[in-house]
Image: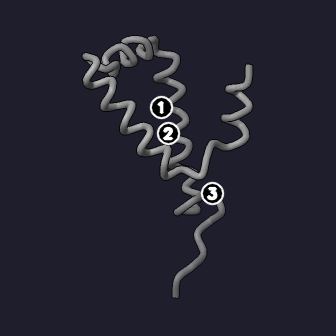
Amino acid sequence: MATTPAKDQVQGEGDYDAARRYDKASREFAESGQVEPAAHDAAPENEREAAELERAEEEGKSHSKGEGRLVSDKRKP
C-alpha cells in the first residue's frame, strides 16, 4: 500500500526540493557577476542568426495563450 508523501516532499507540480535547488542556483548565478558575460556569449553572432532567433521566438509566441498579467504590467511605460 502506498503512503502519502510528507507535505515537504510533494512531487510533480509541487517538487519543493527541486524548486529550492533552482532558486539557490539562480540566486548564486545572478550574484556571481557572470550574467553579463553569459548574455554576451548567448547573443546572435550575425544578422542571419538574429533573424532565425526572431522567427523562432515568433513561432513560439504563436502557440502561447499570451503573457500573464505580471509580465504585461512590467512592460507598461
Q: Residues within 10 Å of mark 2 (few under 14, many from 20)?
A: few
Front-most of residues 7 and 31: 31
- Local secondary structure at mark 2: helix
Q: Which residue is mark 2?
A: 22
Residue type at mark 1: give it. Ala
Q: Residues within 10 Å of mark 3 (few under 14, many from 20)?
A: few
Q: Residue at x 31, y 20 (%)?
A: 44
Find residue 14 and report its horizontal and vertical position in percent.
Answer: 59, 58
Question: Relative to 36, is 16 on the left or the right?
Answer: right
Q: Which mark, residue 8? A: 3
Find residue 48 and report its horizontal and vertical position in percent.
Answer: 25, 23
User: Whole-Å distance between the Cαs marked 3 and 2?
Assistant: 16 Å
Find residue 49 and report its horizontal and vertical position in percent.
Answer: 27, 25
Q: Residue furthest bottom?
A: 1
State yes or no: discs 3 and 2 in contact (Cβ < 8 Å): no
Query: Which comes before the other along the chain, label 3 or label 2?
Result: 3
Residue type at mark 2: give it. Tyr
State yes or no: discs 3 and 1 in contact (Cβ < 8 Å): no
Q: Which residue is mark 1?
A: 25
Instruction: In the rendered view, tell whether residue 75 sits above or below residue 36.
Output: below
Instruction: In the rendered view, tell whether residue 77 sits above or below residue 56.
Output: above
State yes or no: discs 1 and 2 in contact (Cβ < 8 Å): yes
User: Whole-Å distance between the Cαs marked 1 and 2?
Assistant: 5 Å
Colour option used:
one colour
Viewer-side label of 3, 2: 2
Query: Which comes before the other along the chain, label 3 or label 1?
Result: 3
